[in-house]
């Protein structure tokens, strides 16, 4: 299991995931102009997820033999679990833990970044072993 995380494929996953995370994080600011923090996180996550799927399919798991539709559905299922993690961590940090710790600046930004990073390892294993197997 540890060997999964010390491979060139995992480094590509982190790189592509970082691009998707930037899309996710940046689009949240735009969505936040019209929607609540929680709704903006979900919409931003969808933008990041689409970006992540395209990059993962083209660059990380390009040797996958599953049909595109199967990979996309499996990718969606893994990411539905991950968005629950992202939302829970982001809201918990933004509205409870960070204020309780006395953090007063960039609360939503810190919370959202930590929320985005949280499912990194579980998502990689899920995508490697199931979405793009």
Image (cartoon, rainbow, N blue to C red):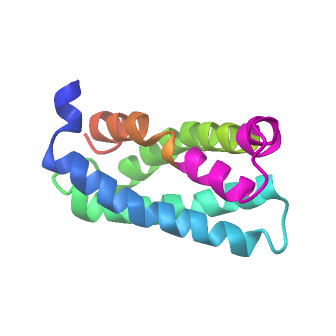
Q: Residue furthest front?
A: 102
Residue 2 in the image: state x and y as whole percent: 22, 26
Residue 28 in the image: state x and y as whole percent: 67, 66
Residue at (75, 35) in percent of width and height: 97
- Seen from the viewer's position, the closer of residues 13 and 77 is 13
Q: For residue 99: magenta?
A: yes
Residue 101 location, quadrant = top right
Q: For residue 4: magenta?
A: no
Residue 52 location, quadrant = bottom left
Residue at (32, 53) in percent of width and height: 14
Residue 43 location, quadrant = bottom right
| Quadrant location of the N terminus in the rendered image | top left
Answer above or below: position of 19 versus 114. below
| Quadrant location of the C terminus in the rendered image | top left
Q: Do we see residue 126 in this rendering?
A: yes
Q: Is residue 84 left or right of residue 8?
A: right
Tally of numbered discs? 0
Q: Is residue 32 left or right of residue 17?
A: right
Residue at (59, 71) in percent of width and height: 26
Residue 67 in the image: state x and y as whole percent: 30, 52
Residue 123 in the image: state x and y as whole percent: 41, 40
Q: Do we see residue 50 in this rendering?
A: no
Q: Is residue 55 left or right of residue 76?
A: left
Magenta residues, dominant SS class:
helix
Magenta part of the protein: which range?
92-116
């Amino acid at each position: 299991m540890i060997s999964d995380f010390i491979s060139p494929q995992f480094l590509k996953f982190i790189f592509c995931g970082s691009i998707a995370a930037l899309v996710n994080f940046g689009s949240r600011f735009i969505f936040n102009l019209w929607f609540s923090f929680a709704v903006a996180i979900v919409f931003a996550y969808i933008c990041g997820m689409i970006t992540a799927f395209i990059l993962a399919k083209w660059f990380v798991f390009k040797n996958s033999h599953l049909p595109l539709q199967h990979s996309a559905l499996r990718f969606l299922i893994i990411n539905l679990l991950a968005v629950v993690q992202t939302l829970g961590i982001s809201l918990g940090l933004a509205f409870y833990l960070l204020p309780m710790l006395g953090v007063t600046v960039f609360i939503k930004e810190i919370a959202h970044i930590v929320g985005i990073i949280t499912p990194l390892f579980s998502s990689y294993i899920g995508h490697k072993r199931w979405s793009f197997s």
